[in-house]
Amino acid sequence: MEKPVLLTIKGLQIEGRSGDAWHPIVKGVDLTLHKGEVLGLIGESGAGKSTLGLAAMGFARDGCRISGGTIDFDGIDLRTAPEAKRRGLRGKRIAYVAQSAAASFNPAHKLIDQYCEGPVVHGVMSREKAEADAVELYRRMRLPNSEEIGFRYPHQVSGGQLQRAMTAMAMACRPDLIIFDEPTTALDVTTQIEVLAAIRDIVRQFGTAAIYITHDLAVVAQMADRIKVLLRGDEVEEADTRSMLAAPRQDYTRSLWAVRSFARAEQPPATGTPVVSVRNVTAAYGAVDVLKNVSFDIHARRTVAVVGESGSGKSTTARVITGLLPPRKGEVLFNGKVLPPNFKARSREELRQCQMIYQMADTALNPKLRLRELIGRPAEMYLGLRGKALETRIRDLLALIELEPDKYIDRLPSELSGGQKQRIGIARALAAEPQLIICDEVTSALDQIVQEGILKLLNRLQGELNLAYMFITHDLATVKSIADKVVVMQHGAVVERGPKAALFADPKEDYTNLLLSSVPEMDPDWLNRLLAARGGHA
């Protein structure tokens, strides 16, 4: 028997402002959601997924406006309802779980205080009952020490724990609808399994309807009853999950299913002196060792992927290589020469040779600087370029990353897509003409089509410029695409290393097997089978 309809959106049109002009973002989309149902929204960057999800709350971001259509939530027209009424629904009957929990929590308040605010303000329960309820929902979300964890600040818990705490907070008023906006994108595969299982269980337990926004098709296969595909603000197709996965009707949907076809050609064994050698490095934050006797080499024209769950030491190893965290023991060699452990003691030439591309291009690029300044500063600082030579270098770099110089050179970061911003991060790293580039989760926040473009670009640049890459990632599909060698880390130590093909085909360590088995598959039954194999535990 079909459940009652909770949300009906008809002919929705949303526009965004650019200067004095308005342009369409969502173009007449319809959506129907029943009580207790989960609808997956998928599509590449700019498809309108998040904009549509926010519109389900009767909300439009700054610079956007809902210009047409109707939004009916349980008999309430969210387009015409007074703002006070809409505000009364948000948090109480409609909740939102953002992509970045770290950016969404107030760092100055404890988790339980932020949990209790919603139900107390909306008059759902008293502070005392809200605190007891928080403990119960933390337990249901499989958070450790459920009676104590709420009294920590956001920075005192892991990313996966914070994401589950945000989901619990969204459930505090027992809403009828939750919008999940890429809630597991930034999580490693083992943590992602825990969060997915917890989200799915709690939505089912309370009969909550959900809109699950994601670019990860394997994830949406585990979560959604139905899937709607969007492209540049238009609906492409919609069907129940099993039908969509088995036989998508439209060419665009089939193209989404086929992404990640790129795989780097197998390279011959590297010879000669490595560009970078990490030798028996132990490093600490305060009195606690966070890296323990870490060693590996990276050669020119080779990519070493460093993988492991959150807290395994991947990014900390990068901090040691760049001199931001001097090791307590061990050393880092560059072309066979020992580097000073602290970046302050390194020469400009030593600093130039190692550059980084960061995970979040949005926060890595100064929003007030135009692209010519963002790309030009490293070339000016490290290579001494000025005037016409600098202008030529900036334009050459834009062409190298496949952005038209005349079209993009004077744009601000806000005028770029996510993939274009990441390309600027690549150009900025290349501007110094380094030998080593450290790529820190550079594709994790991008949709799969854009990811593939970035990986192909990095692979091409490596061959053309003789670069060595250290690729920090939790995405094992990315590792399969681009790596030559893999270093697996856990609790600050290297547990396994080897050529990519050999490690994927025959992993020796239990932890490596755990990582490989945690990669979601495009099968709606995959999560159920995995949890059953692990005795019901993620």
Image (cartoon, grey):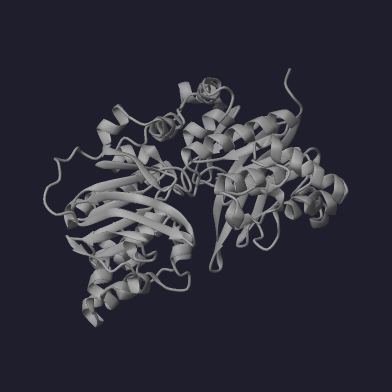
| Above/below status of 375 relative to 226 | below
Q: Nearer the viewer, residue 88 or 232?
A: 88
Is 117 left, or right, of 141 in this rendering?
right
- Residue 350 in the image: state x and y as whole percent: 24, 70
In the picture, the quarter occupied by the N terminus is top right
**Residue furthest toward the left?**
272
Instruction: Point out residue 248 in the picture as x, y percentages from the top left corner.
Output: 46, 26
Residue at the top extreme, as displayed: 1
Look at the picture and state if 387 lies above or below 372.
below
Residue 65 in picture, x, y percent from top left: 64, 57
**Residue 122 is at least partly visible in this image:** no
**Whole-percent x, y for residue 95 in the image:** 71, 45
Q: Residue at x 53, y 26 (%)?
A: 527
* The C terminus lies in quadrant: top right
The residue under the point 44% across, 64% down is: 364
- Left or right: 315 as drawn, with respect to 176: left
In which image quadrant can residue 370 be found?
bottom left
Residue at coordinates 63% horizontally, 31% vertically from top-left? 200
